[in-house]
Amino acid sequence: MRSKKTISIASCLLLAVLVLTMMSSTTLADPLEEGVAAYKRGNYADAVRLLSQSAEQGNVFAQEALGAMYHDGEGVAQDYALAEKWCRMAAEQGHAQAQQNLGYMYKHGEGVHQNFVEAAKWYLKAAEQGNPLAQNNLGVLYAKGEGVSQDHVVASMWFRKAAEQGNAEAQVSLGFKYNNGEGVPQDYTQAVKWYTEAANQGKTIAQVNLAAKYGKGEGVPIDYEKAAMWYLKAAEQGDALAQYSLGKMYRNGHGLPKDSTEAVIWFRKAAEQGHVEAQTHLGIMCQKDLIPGGPSKAARWYRRAAEKGYAYAQYSLGVMYEFGEGVSQDYDKAIKWYRKAAAQESPDAFYCLGALYFRGDGVPLDYSQASKWFREAAERGDTQSQLNIGVMYVKGQGVPTDYVEAYKWFTIAALYGGDEKGAMGLARLETMMTPSQIGQARMLAQGWKSKKD
């Protein structure tokens, strides 16, 4: 059991097998055979009545099937307590699928108190009999450390056993383990192998992961056409990340003809599902007049992503409020959104806050606050902020006059940002500094590391 519906599906498969079994056996009771036939016809009420007779006689197949029907509410009112009763009776007689089902109920607290230790116990009994669902579910418990000590090696072992039997979820999990080197050596080729197995079964997450591998050339040669093919398969199943990624491929012409109309179609599908990057992309395209809507529509898209905590959208919405684009100019709201983005360490938001305090726009002019925010942006690689903080050290604005610090920041802007203004600032400063100060500043610049790294 991976979901409530899986119980029903597993039972249907089991009952289909029982029909073949009964054709060659006269030892099974008639109520079971008749119950199977009723189930296959979709006559669940009769199936429950007939299977109950067989289950009461101790038939494990009927007990497991009856437990699944009570779990799903097929032909009876959904009743987890009765589902647990019948599953347990079959499980205690060694029925692997019933053991798997009982483990599932313990894991999710259905008909019993949630108990991961008991879940692991029953999953193990079924897994040792070769039940692939139980093997996968046991692997999940070991991967998360639920009911057992976390152990990625053991988790990978169970995922492999299930994956080799064709369990798509286990194939995805094993691919993930190889991708990240958890419990197995990192091996992108193996990751691709298992993602492909699951993707061919229609597993959307595997299709998305496989597409990403083809796009990056990890474990396979870079192949944008194959990446687009797999994104399309997942996108058509409604996967938002795949829809967004497909939109980017249409926008950039990677593996597909460059087509802004198609890009927008897929961005919109993802955006309507709440994908914040797709919403932000639509905002950018509206703002640049690449699609109809203009600044007002751009602001609406930015707001949807910003309210979900996406930093770039928060910064972008702040810009629109600062300059009155698509919304009424409102410095308070601009600062509100800049601060939200700054809390997520957005260099752009740091810079904008610094600029507001430096100019005194919407807030009292405050060089100390300006230098604080410019420094935050500068430390994360924003070249303009590096130049600004350098100038503030030269002039003593919000910070003590310090030519060594100024020279350091101009050097960083010139070296890492390729900024000509930084080089010009260095030339002017050198006339005001001693060789020792210049040497000290250069050492500081060479030892600098961006906080983004």
Image (tube, rainbow, N blue to C red):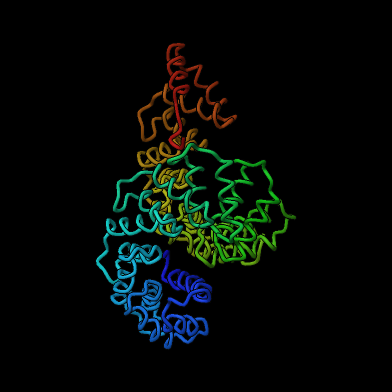
Image coordinates of residue 86 in percent, x first then y, are 32, 74
Q: Tell me if residue 52 comes above or below residue 285 in the rendering.
A: below
Q: Residue furthest front?
A: 26
Q: In the image shown, does 50 or 290 lie closer to the viewer? A: 50
Locate the N terminus by quadrant: bottom left
Q: In the image shown, does 90 or 407 lie closer to the viewer? A: 90
Q: Residue at 59% of width from left, 49% of height from top?
A: 212
Q: How many marks?
A: 0
Q: Residue furthest left?
A: 113
Image coordinates of residue 130 in percent, x first then y, are 44, 56
Image coordinates of residue 53 in percent, x first then y, are 35, 83
Q: In the image shown, does 55 or 164 lie closer to the viewer? A: 55
Q: Residue furthest top?
A: 435
Q: In the image shown, does 200 or 401 lie closer to the viewer? A: 200
Q: Residue at 54% of width from left, 67% of height from top?
A: 272
Image coordinates of residue 211 in percent, x first then y, are 61, 51
The answer to whether 94 appears left or right of 278 in the picture is left
Residue 237 occupies quadrant: bottom right
Q: Tell me if residue 388 comes above or below residue 331 in the rendering.
A: above
Q: Residue at 46% of width from left, 11% of height from top?
A: 435
Q: Residue at 28% of width from left, 75% of height from top?
A: 81
Q: Tell me if residue 435 comes above or below residue 399 in the rendering.
A: above
